[in-house]
Amino acid sequence: MTTHTKLLLSAMLGAAWAWAGCSVGSLIDGSLTDRAEGVGPVVARYALTAEDGNALPCCAVDSGAVRITVVGGALTFHGPADYHDTVYTPGGPMSAACVHGVPSGANVNSFTHIVTLPDGTSYLQLPCDRGSYTLVVMRRLENTDGSSTTDSVAISSGTFTASPDHVHLVDSGNARGFTTTVSGATLVVASSAHQYRFEAQH
């Protein structure tokens, strides 16, 4: 086999691996794992309504010549993208993580994501069982000269998993930094420093 033939065969094999969806990194470390899932579309958004039990606007603090007040925020969930578990539905192909079965006669509220069963019991079910999230707090900054501005601070971002009446957040920088409790359409996210209450929003 000539050197030219060997190079051509090597290039063809490399193309076949790439077509099969294997990354170079996967081949080097000997595994055949899929790529990490990307950030998909927004599937749910919750508005910040209270911090540390105080309704917004609240929790003003002075920092130098600036008074900082929490005035809003959002907890936003994104479904998976570049997924490898495609399910074909009447609405088109989507990740199996975003396809849920409900009992006959159940009502699904697309605004609050509350599923109400025929017997009257209900539970929260996010539109997708996994994906990514961001937790952002909006602040009003008031200067001593009377001027003011508003900024947004990303408190946390990472991945989430969900099941009926359960949401688990994993911060990309601190895997054990947050706990989440569910009560109806309300999510309470607590860290060592603050507690944030979120309500479903359009």
Image (cartoon, helix red, strand yellow):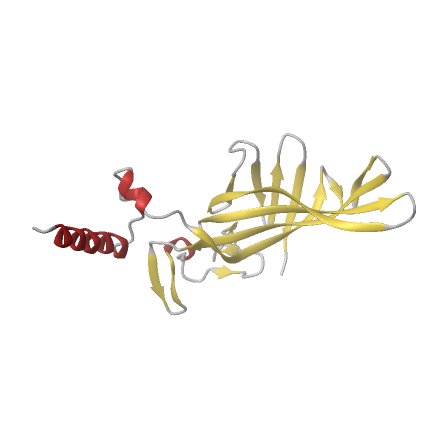
Nearest the eye: 179 or 19: 19
Give coordinates of residue 166: x percent, y percent.
50, 43
Residue 76 locus on image (x, y percent)? 58, 51
Residue, far bottom: 90
The answer to whether residue 38 shows anywhere in this view is yes
In the image, is 197 to the left or to the right of 39? right
Percent position of residue 101, x then y: 39, 57
User: Can residue 102 be spotted in the picture?
Assistant: no
Q: What is the quadrant of residue 30 in the picture?
A: top left
106 relative position to 139: left or right: left
Tell how many labels. Answer: 0
Q: Image height check: is 93 above or below 84?
A: below
Of 6 and 165, the residue lying toward us? 6
Q: Residue furthest right?
A: 145
Classify residue 52 as left or right of residue 38.
right
In-image side of 108 versus 147 (left or right): left
- Vertical comparison of 163 with 89: above or below: above
Residue at horizontal 50%, vertical 61%?
A: 107
Task: Determine the residue located farthest toward the left in the rendered image.
Answer: 1
Viewer-proximal residue, 65 or 162? 65
- For the C terminus, the quadrant is bottom right
Front residue of 127/34: it is 34
- At 87% from the left and 44% from the top, the residue drawn is 143
Q: Which residue appears at 72% of the width and 39% of the height?
A: 53
Image point (66%, 44%), residue name: 197
